[in-house]
Image (cartoon, grey):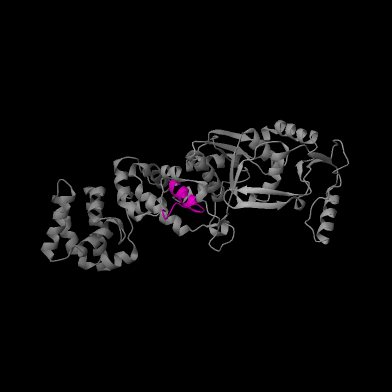
Amino acid sequence: MKKIITRFPPSPTGYLHVGGARTALFNWLYARHMNGRFVLRIEDTDIQRSTQESVEAIFNALEWLGIDWDEGPYYQTKRFPIYRDYIQRLLNSGHAYYCTCSREDIEAMRAKAVSEGQNPKYDGTCRNRDLSQTENAVVRFRTPQTGTTVIQDVIKGNIVIQNSELDDFIIQRSDGTPTYNLAVVVDDITMEINTVIRGDDHVSNTPKQILLFKALESTLPTFGHVPMVLGNDRTRLSKRHGAMSVMAYKDMGYLPEALLNYLVRLGWSYGDQEFFTIPELIEKFSLEHIGKSPGVFDMEKLNALNADHIMASTASKLSPELVSILKKKEINAKKGPYIEKVIDTLKPRSKTLIEMADKSMFYYLDNISYDEKAARKFLKPAALEPLSILQDQLTLLDPFTEKGLEEAFKHVMETLGLKLGKIAQPVRVALTGESASPGIFEIIEILGKEKVMDRIRKAIEFIETKRSE
């Protein structure tokens, strides 16, 4: 079997959005599943809109996602001599011709066609004039005027287009630059791309590209057009749905493997399985399981899947990113055993790393603030005696272990005839500022004796001050 070669060809006119990332992912997974090759190609022929900043943004996003490439990056702007050579071949074989019709001429042709109930298109004025190259001439492809062009789509099935619906499209502009369809076909031929997986917004380009492949006597690649990603209102995904750059999801605290897992499930399935590791995706991915219906982007589902991936990750793997987030919050956290213990307490409670960072602040701050509602409910005079007795017990405790902590709490319970909740909740608010947190003994052991004693003392002072007001 011929080695599978796929490609991802972004235009560097902005950031890499989630739809583009999904296209890259499908091509990458298929190449990896088939032990093939994955090519990165930068389609930068739109010189006015293409920027190096966008190129770097695409590289950064792919790197963060873990999508690597075997060839490239190739830049179309560096391949103009190759395109000119192929355009000349089409001219020599009679599959292309020069056209000198003005923009006004073209608009008049299209208006006339519309008035006659036809598709607005070029009417072939220069088709048989055998013109030579001139300063303002474009090159058009001589499209067959009869018959059909069939897209044998592995996802959508056969799509039949009447050639009479197509016009003689431009393959070289008057400034000598190639158009999109010509450049794509030449790139796919010269890079030996044999599998093209892309969004179904490209279906209208495919018959033109098939005709170019045939005119250049080249083997057609396998085409698969993936339904678009929609917002929850079933319209095309846009910023109003929360769509944004891939790297924005990094900044929001999502894990790359969670985003990849979610994107692949927007249009692909493997039974009822929702959670996938990257090795599992590579093992199980196939074109046959790509669906024909559009995927609907749902932030709640992404949050749930991200929470699952956080739970499945090790603390050591999560710690570098959490350290980075905390530093942006002016918290000087460091990688090592301390933050890994912090992470292990917060993994079950965090949908994103941003949420984890917010919940971890009490572990690092010298002075915490109390949630007003929590303080009003739990830091009240009735809590003074249990907090004071616990303070005395903890002062004597050495070493400061979970078993010793349990004994200290048990002593307070037996002394005052209280259940654990009546003691634990005031202590929780004293230590974290909140009424909900990880397990109280876990917190105390991680914070350490000095911080715990200081916070209990401050809570006692807080209650006494409030009582005297």
Depth check: give the residue in front, 214 or 366.
Answer: 214
Q: Is residue 271 magenta?
A: yes
- Residue 281: give x, y in percent of width and height: 44, 45
| x and y, in percent, of residue 218 in the image | 67, 36
Q: Quadrant of residue 429?
A: bottom left
Which residue is pictured at 71% across the width and 43% down the height? 211
Regarding residue 392, the answer to whether it shows in the image is no
> Outermost residue toward the left?
415
Which residue occupies the foreground of this view, 127 or 253?
A: 127
Q: 463 or 72, which is in the foreground?
A: 72
| Residue 41 relative to residue 284: left or right | right
Q: What x and y, as percent, mark residue 447?
A: 26, 49
Image quarter in which the C terminus is found: bottom left
Which residue is at 29% across, 46% downward?
341
Is residue 214 or residue 363 the one in the foreground?
214
Q: Count the marks.
A: 0
Where residue 82 sits, quadrant-wise, is: top right
Instruction: Give yes or no for residue 444 being in the magenta stretch.
Output: no
Left or right of 22 on screen, residue 124: right
The structure residue drawn at horizontal position 27% and vertical position 56%, both measured from the top left corner, is 431
**What's drawn in magenta, residue-wise?**
256-273
Q: Determine the residue located farthest toward the right in the rendered image.
A: 129
Please say whether residue 166 is visible from this viewpoint. Answer: yes
Residue 17: where, in percent of width, then height?
56, 49
Q: On the rendered structure, is 178 left or right of 115?
A: left
Left-right relation of 432 to 262: left
Using the rendered view, name the quadrant where residue 385 is placed. Answer: bottom left
